[in-house]
Image (cartoon, grey):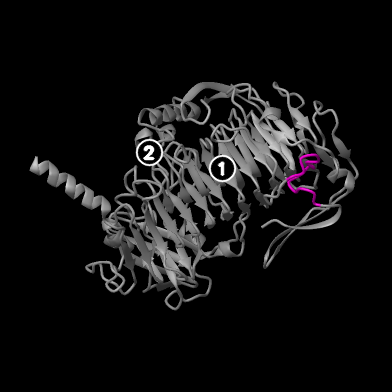
Amino acid sequence: MKTLTLVLCLALFTLSLPAEEFHVKVNGNDKNNGSEAQPFRTISAAAQIAQPGDVITVHEGVYRERITPPRGGSSPSNRIVYRAAEGARVEIKGSEVITDWQRFKGDVWRVTLPNAFFRDYNPYQDVIAGDWFNNQGRQHHTGDVYLNGKSLYEMDTLEAVLQPEPISGNFDPKGSTYTWYCESDHENTTIYANFQGADPNQELVEINVRDSCFYPDKPGCDYITIHGFRLSQAATQWAPPTAEQIGLIGTHWSKGWIIENNVIHDSRCSGITLGKDRKTGQNVWSRNRVKDGATHYNEVIFRALHIGWSKETIGGHIIRNNTIFNCEQTGICGSLGGVFSQITNNHIYNIWTKRLFSGAEIAGIKIHASIDMLIKSNHIHNTGRGIWIDWMAQGTRITGNILYHNTTDDLFSEVNHGPYLVDNNVFLSDIVLRDWSEGGAFVHNLFAGRIWYRPEPNRFTPYHRAHSTEVAGVRNIAGSDNRFYNNIFVQRRTNHPTPSDKTLDFGPAVYDDAVFPLQSEGNVYLNGARPCREESHPLIKADFDPMIELEEKDDGIYLFLTLDESITSRANPLVTTKLLGKTKISESAFENPDGSPLTIDRDFYGRKRDSKNSCAGPFSNPGAGRLTLKVW
């Protein structure tokens, strides 16, 4: 009895201990106790001892390390917080500075490093590979070389470094003449780099040496916050949905992370990953081509369910207010691990700009299983794809985002059965919507580009019980079963090629031959955009050009367009759960994640809509004439 009493007293004492704050400074020492007077030198040292409720405050400076947290918090209110000190510029880098370059020939320099320099991971021996990766006929390494913070272009031969030519199709032809090449054997790694006249021994030259900046080695490190850092230069591997997805920051099959107010850039592949557990499969399609990719991924999903994939154990992350750029695969991606999460108010740009390799997993935001996910108020441009919701978008809401200058499309919905809601967005790229799904609702958007529609009869994908990961059935995509209410469609001149075997046009007329009919009402069609035949009273102004322009100014992004009173004074009803109905295949309603009915009664800015005149487009009562609207 005395022993039991003692144990209980110790447990109560432990529970009552106040949370601690540990400090990290570049002039600290990992043998210190972590107090402000005796700070640690590395963030990793603080991570090893931090317990639920503790805060790790990192002070000004550059920290070259991979943080591998051994544990997380115990609840949303008892998390482990990693934060940059107030007002401090704190950089976490997956790179090291390299000096002692020797001139090789002309503008080309070389450095030889013993393989022991890389410890247990050498990015110049690690080749990028995985399911749905296209290497364009050559090898690519996870390593990279940076001159004064700018990434160089990897070449597959030394000759291409000695005599570089601008690479066509990428975003920076002149910059693509800054090149590098590597050779590695059992003892040494040699890197050759063309610095175009710069002396690397007089400049800042860095190379990737770590596969991540912040990533737990094991699943289940829940309730971690990462706040206010600049994280960059990681040798990340290709992150398909059928593999463990290791990003520059990654949650690794955990729950309840908050990743906020960070600047994340120069990941070899992906910036933030909300990925699955490796035990459910690792590049399974590449290893077994007997089965098709869809069958393999269905098996991955059922293995995930078997090990406990549910709202109670996985997802529920908040990714907000981050700036993400210069990643060659994705800004944010997630397979299964991002369910029930929120991705809000992030600026994502310059994704897949080098164009040295390609694949089916490239986008600003790429999510598999965006179940009950909110993607809101993000600014996404200069990518391949903007937002890609792939498989199991159910209860997903994409609202208040602005997308433009995306070379493939703004929004791609692939093999989903719905219900998912796309409302109050501004889509301005050549292709604004690529729809290979069914069961979507598109409400109060500005679509100033083409829609590309096709069914997917040969792929069978899951649908779920409402607000759950539990699979209710598996079905192919017959097509459509969409709703279009109160949108503005605009035909704009485009340089995008028109595929001969796909349905591609301005407006929902592309769905006229779909298996399932549309619900369509209250839409406006300008400058040649075309309604579907199901819409009874469309407003068509074939000769009206709203003259849409976008301008990036120092204080924000401005949208210029011209509207008249006939466009802004239509007495459209508010769009509600009742109006949208239920999807045909998943038989689920368009509703809030808690199961309550929804009403689209607020606009792009969050302003209340007029219940008697819910005018078309993302902006409530914008007025008539030439309008100037700040959209970011």
Residue drawn where x is 53% and y is 65% of the image? 178
Question: Residue type at mark 2?
Answer: Asp
Q: Position of residue 376 (x, y in %)?
A: 60, 47
Where is mark 2, residue-wise?
Answer: 277
Residue 599 in sight: yes
Range of the magenta residues? Answer: 609-622
10 to the left or right of 49: left
Helix, strand or loop under label 2: loop
| Picture layout, residue 438 above or below residue 607 | above
Q: Residue furthest bottom?
A: 202
Question: Residue type at mark 1?
Answer: Leu
Residue drawn where x is 66% and y is 44% of the image? 409
589 to the left or right of 190: right
| Picture layout, residue 425 above or below residue 30 | above
Q: Main secondary structure of the magenta part?
A: loop
Where is mark 1, residue-wise?
Answer: 374
Assign the N terminus to one quadrant of the image: top left
Q: Residue furthest left?
A: 2
Camera-side residue of 197 and 60: 60
